[in-house]
Image: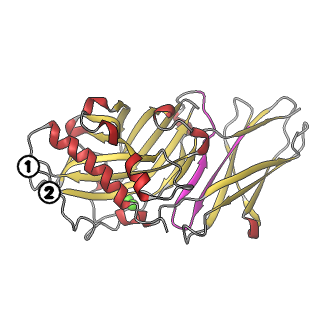
Amino acid sequence: MLIIKRENIFVILTMIIGLAAAARPAAAQVMPDDIFDNCPEAFGDTLNDVPPDIHSVEITPAAPAPGETVTVRAQIMTDKWLTVYKVENAVLTYIAGEAAAPVDVEMKLAEPGNWIWEAQIPGQPEGTVVKYGITAHDGTGNAVVQLIETAGFEPGRFTDVLADKENKDIEGSLDLLGLAMMSDGENYYYCEEFRTQFKWATFRGAAITGVGFYPQDVRVIPAHSITENTNAFIGYVPAIGIKSIIGLNNLKNITQGIPVSIKVKGNKVCGRTKISDLTDKPERGLKMFAATAAYDFNGTGKLNLSDSTPYAIVYFKANKYIVK
Ligand SMILES: [Ca+2]
Ligand SMILES: [Ca+2]
């Protein structure tokens, strides 16, 4: 069973904290053994960390003619050996023509035994380029998404991939409500949504947020030792000026982190990275999530885990066909 990925988050947060300690004089970091004992319920949402995946997508007819309805069939499922949760819903999003708005269609579970989900795209005129992608969720909110490529930054084209509960036992500025994403094929854009505006400091210390990602394919190699050593975060710790991709190999020098563009807008923290800085195999999908913590580096030296979203497998490109 691949569970309690909180340990991995802990490792990464420890790295960020190490940087924080190195960057300015502060109380020694004390990492208590009981750090997870009183873990907020919000952070405990990540107890199951194996998202669903899309194993196949096909269309009928394979070469659609003008006006012909297209049926999209996809095998979308969880790994029953790695998670108790099952796929509960799937949505097909399509864009018919360059200037068209995205349309969402709920997919039906057409073959429950094989986890084949199905939806239709209405017939289109000759020459129409139809792009389509799937977003699916399991019973604990973990997701898989195929992002339909945008033509650069298009603020209206974010996909809400991960939703997170309101958690009134943590500060609003650390309480994640969701993670939205967009891809133009070269850049990955994300917006974390918070209950209130994200601030650089909280009453428990410096605020930390990040989007975690696993370059290794943990669906094939579900080993903690491997994922722990290759994990990385798109990290944002404004109190010490961190806006960068932080991994195990560049911890000793903060300037070695790959810089990331990150902005606070209202109750959102939004960022942009090059997809090639996240993975050299984008086609196999990247497992991602968002998390927050607070670090009291001027006081007790204690790290306080705050919140984490469920997990998603993210594909940075979707599918398409041309009506002939
Ligand atoms: Ca949560
Ligand atoms: Ca939350």
Asked if one can make out residue 173 in the rendered structure from this viewpoint, the answer is no
User: Is residue 171 shown in magenta?
Assistant: no
Image height of 87 relative to 57, above or below: below
- Residue at (29%, 55%) from the top-left corner? 172
**Residue 278, disc:** none
Quarter that holds the C terminus: top right
Q: Which residue is mark 2?
A: 30
Within 8 Å of ligand 1, the CB of disc 1? Answer: no
> Is disc 1 placed on a helix, strand or loop?
loop
User: Is residue 146 shown in magenta?
Assistant: yes
Within 10 Å of disc 2 (Cα), the crowding (few <14, some 14-19, many 20+) is few
Magenta-colored span: 131-151
Say left or right for 89 vs 114: left
Amino acid at circle 1: Ala
Q: Are marks 2 and 1 in contact (CB under 8 Å)?
A: yes
Say left or right for 29 vs 171: left
Say left or right for 263 vs 318: left
- Residue at (38%, 32%) from the top-left corner? 260
Across and down, in percent, residue 149 comes to 62, 34
Across and down, in percent, residue 143 comes to 55, 56
Within 8 Å of ligand 1, the CB of disc 2? Answer: no
Within 10 Å of disc 1 (Cα), the crowding (few <14, some 14-19, many 20+) is some
Q: Which residue is mark 1?
A: 27
Between 194 and 80, the residue placed more toward the observer is 80
The image quadrant of residue 225 is: bottom left
Between 72 and 126, the residue placed more toward the observer is 72
Across and down, in percent, residue 238 comes to 25, 38
The image quadrant of residue 30 is: bottom left
Across and down, in percent, residue 252 comes to 24, 36
